[in-house]
Image: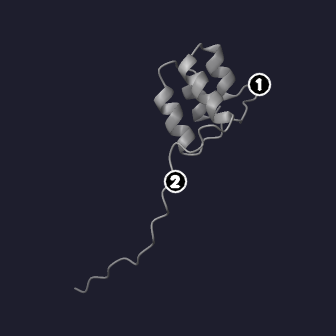
């Protein structure tokens, strides 16, 4: 069970589910019994989470947020003592 699956089981966790999706959680993964996060949300009667996951898996909301560019690595400052 992934964090997305676990979060989708609670009706009031839509914000958490959205954040996990934005950070790259895979909504199409299944658990050992073949259930996805979407099917778990449907079982728990979480309509907002179901709508969110349906939009995400259909590819309609992949652009909610743009991924930040990786920070440039800088050399650590060397202090002379």
Quadrant of the rendered structure where residue 81 is?
bottom left
Say few, some or many: other residues with alpha carbon within 10 Å of mark 1 (under 14 / 14 to 19 / 20 or more). Answer: few
* In the image, residue 81 above or below residue 36: below
Quadrant of the rendered structure where residue 34 is?
top right
Residue 67, label in figure: 2
In percent of the image, x 54 and y 27: which residue is there? 7
Percent x, y for residue 18? Answer: 52, 34
In percent of the image, x 51 and y 51: which residue is there? 66
Residue 33, label in figure: 1
Quadrant of the rendered structure where residue 39 is?
top right
User: Pointer 1 and pointer 2: residues touching (CB < 8 Å)?
Assistant: no
Q: Nearer the observer, disc 1 or disc 2?
A: 2
| Camera-nearest residue between 74 and 14 | 14
In percent of the image, x 65 and y 21: which residue is there? 40
Q: Residue furthest front?
A: 60
Q: CA distance from mark 1 to mark 2?
A: 32 Å
Residue 51, label in figure: none
On the picture, is 52 further left or further right than 28? left
Percent x, y for residue 42? Answer: 65, 17
- Lower position in the chain sequence, tag 1 or tag 2: 1
Percent x, y for residue 60? Answer: 63, 37
Say few, some or many: other residues with alpha carbon within 10 Å of mark 2 (under 14 / 14 to 19 / 20 or more). Answer: few
Say what secondary structure mark 1 lies in. loop
Q: Residue furthest left?
A: 81
* In the image, residue 46 above or below residue 5: above
In percent of the image, x 36 and y 76: which residue is there? 76
Percent x, y for residue 21? Answer: 57, 39
């Amino acid at each position: 069970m992934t964090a997305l699956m676990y979060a989708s089981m609670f009706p009031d966790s839509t914000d958490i589910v959205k954040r996990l999706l934005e950070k790259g959680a895979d909504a199409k993964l299944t658990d050992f019994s073949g259930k996805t996060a979407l099917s778990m949300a449907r079982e728990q009667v979480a309509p907002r989470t179901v709508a969110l996951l349906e939009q995400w898996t259909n590819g309609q909301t992949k652009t909610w947020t743009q991924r930040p560019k990786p920070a440039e690595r800088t050399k650590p400052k060397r202090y002379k003592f």
